Image (tube, helix red, strand yellow):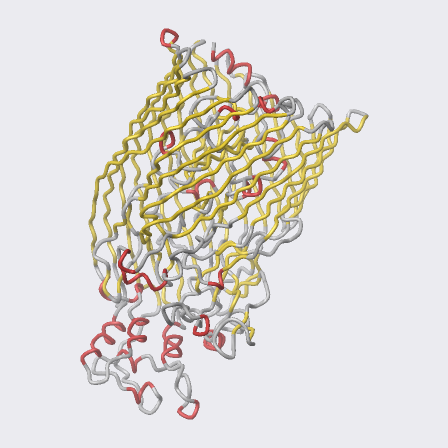
Amino acid sequence: MRFTKILTTSASAIALTAVAAGGVAAQEVTSVDEIVVTAQKREQSLQDVPIVVTSLSEQVLEDAGVRDIKDMQILTPGLTVTSTTSETITTARIRGVGTVGDNPGLESSVGVVIDGVYRPRNGVGFGDLGEMSRIEVLKGPQGTLFGKNTSAGVINIITEAPSFQPGFEGELTGGDYGAWGVAGSVTGPLSENIAGRLYVASRQRDGFYDVDTGDGPRTLTEDQTQDFWTARGQLLILPSDLASIRLIADYSRREEFCCVSSQIRVGPTFGFINALANGQGQAAPVTGSGFGPAPGYDFVPFSRTAYSNRDTGQNIEDYGFSAEVNADIEAWNATVTSVTAYRSWESDNGMDIDFTGADLLYRNQDGNFGFGIDTISQELRLAGATANFDWLIGGFYANEDLSRDDSYFLGSDYNAYQSLLFTATVPAALGGPNPGRIQCFTDPTGFNPLCAAGLAPPNAFAPTHIVGQGVDDHYSQSSETFAIFTNNTWRVTDAFELTLGLRWTNDEKDLLVQQDNINGNGSACLGALANQGSASPTPTSALGALCLPWSNPFYDNRSVTESFSEDAFSGTFKAAYRLNDSVMFYGSYARGYKGAGYNLDRVQTGVTPDASLFFPAETVDSWELGFKSTLFNRSLLFNATLFDQTFEDFQLNTFLGTAFVVESIPEVNSTGVDMDMLWFTPVDGLTLNGGLTYAETTYGDFTAADLVNPARFGPLSLLPGNQMSFAPEWSVTGGMTYERSLGAGLMGRFNLSAKYTSEFNTGSDLLPAKMQEAMTMVNGRIGIGSEDERWMLELWGQNLTDEEYYQVVFNAPLQGTAFNSIPYDPATDTQTYNAFLGAPRTWGVTLRVRY
């Protein structure tokens, strides 16, 4: 019976280890046939599944140093994972398609599923995933079986289950940047029918950035630290030969500092920042004949020095419970599966919004900036088989409560900085830029250009921006999702099979927003608006700067209530033909769907807040044609797939310099090829692997009239017809593992993993300054241990060549303007650009023990 098999296969994590299309597992595995995946919610050989799947085993993940979904990029062609203002803001992209996570109202294009439980945002996967049996990366829309928010793919994580064979595993790690970590697990029988497993881990590390604290009050001179612990307990209950129950409870907490950024190009506002900060407020500009306005502002040298006068603390709490019940129905040759889960995730952050040493804008870590998600979900499936037919029907329900709090603080330098910006063109003969002239522009009795030019004193009664907290916003969104689905395979002949899948989803969301200006915030904007009726109105540029979302009086005591309900169909049709035991050809069509939602931020057009925060659903139509081959006596895997995907109403989350806003792009197309190779070579203990993704992922042609809000076309004007951001054309992985006996009961193990990525743009607006050059990442590991694998001592390195690269480049707030003209003209670009950097080279030593 099936649960006799559970008892047998859960006995040893080492014996269970499967091989990935991208790596090798324990030395017992020597055949491609032993690679098992659950991409269609049933156990199948990888080579029998007509889907592009990269499966990564426990040993492969260990060899490459994978702890979270960001680490696994090096093993997966076509996968890109980035983080921005905190580790909560983590975004996974497949074939160049993903969802920027800075707006929590925006759900993911790449779904993350852990032990059958959908996680609502990618950021929840950024943590110690614990003992992993394997990770499966499914490329292309997977909406039939995995739900609505998987329009680009799924990262399916399967952790180790409890075993009825007693065992203990421990790990102790030390490395540079003051890194240390300890982890341990114990498993075994608690009774004749109950087995348990407990995993605990704690990891710490110093920061990757040196921080110049400028005006303070920040005192910490490092950033991007690591400090977290996690615990995961499980029970496997076998009440009979026909049933199993797996209970899981986990808890993780992170208390870290993240994330500052470094300047990569500094524009003309440097002089004002430097004048207001205590010492140098940001990297010094490099002037010359290069990029930017005459005399030119070139890119500054790559540096891990950041400037931040405010703290960037982040506290993240993540916990949940799940129960998976399986029961065989012998009369139907079927199994019923129930997965019930509750998840809670909450973040509390601080942020230096201007990323300089001057005291301009910030958010305190006081509980008023962060977001939380509570989710209850239930999935029920019934799957069975006959001689020629595999069938599955199921239902899914989820209830999600999301809350976001936002708070802005205006620093002591904010008024002076705006005064300097407004008077930047005042000639030196008239005194030049002046930090005390903001009241010339906010005087409700009328704007006096002589005052702005320094020829007349400002009105002392004219309002200025408040110093301190000015914004206190609260967003609450409740969502209900219900779906029914089916997936069925008909083996027409021994060689030919057809698969049909269909899913109907009903999605409902309710939004409640309360936006408030406090402490008199907004009076400066009101004064400037009053000038619009005077003979000499406030210049438009100054009016826009005075009425930015965090200082706009029209948000004061503003409430927004919205709701919607929509139905959608997704599904797939696949045909597979097995030419012989070694080669299978397949073709497929899939329809994917990602739900509509709301912008959880202050969004305005001009100075008027948008009446609705709604953005529509995203859909995708995907076609694939490929083959899977198993050659050389089942020792070589070689798979290739052509794909073409067309997204409609693509949900682009873009930073407008003042807020994150989702705009629906009419069309995005992704066309290319995926390849995977794995070879158990004739050389004993040597395994080679590789993968390739080539993808032309481009925006369709569109104009301002095609957007939901035509006024947003300016910052998006570089998009039509061009390659998407974070979408390299070429992504190539390769690696080798060599294991051999050294005698005297010892074994040696060597692993090298590498990934080449062609150039790609890291900004949603595709500004040229945001390009990341082509790069190659290399990880390596050398180990020596006992042949019975009771212990292993490993020396490892990540990013061995110390590749310097950007995760995300963005426009530094209030520091210049990129789009001074439409179309974009680099000669008028005065923008300062900052970047969140990738991790540097790190190295360390790990001791593992197993009993």
Q: Nearer the viewer, residue 712 or 112?
A: 712
Q: What residue sits 39% from the left and 71% below the top?
A: 412
Q: Could you tell me if residue 60 is visible in this image? A: no
Find residue 571 and report its image quarter: top left
Residue 41 appears at what percent x and percent y?
A: 42, 24
Q: How many tags in the picture?
A: 0
Decide if residue 760 is on the left or right side of residue 301. left
Q: Residue furthest left?
A: 533
Q: Quadrant of the C terminus?
A: top right
Q: Nearer the viewer, residue 18 or 12?
A: 18
Q: Where 488 sits versus 252, above or below?
A: above
Q: Residue furthest right?
A: 744
Q: Nearer the viewer, residue 56 or 327?
A: 56
Q: Residue furthest top?
A: 331
Residue 729 appears at what percent x and percent y?
A: 51, 49
Q: Where 472 sits versus 578, above or below?
A: below
Q: Where 335 sits versus 373, above or below?
A: above
Find residue 741 and report its image quarter: top right
Q: Where 52 sits versus 413, above or below?
A: above
Decide if residue 674 is on the left or right side of residue 342. right
Q: What residue sits 56% from the left and 35% below the top?
A: 676
Residue 667 appears at what percent x and percent y?
A: 34, 49
Q: Could you tell me if residue 633 is visible in this image? A: yes
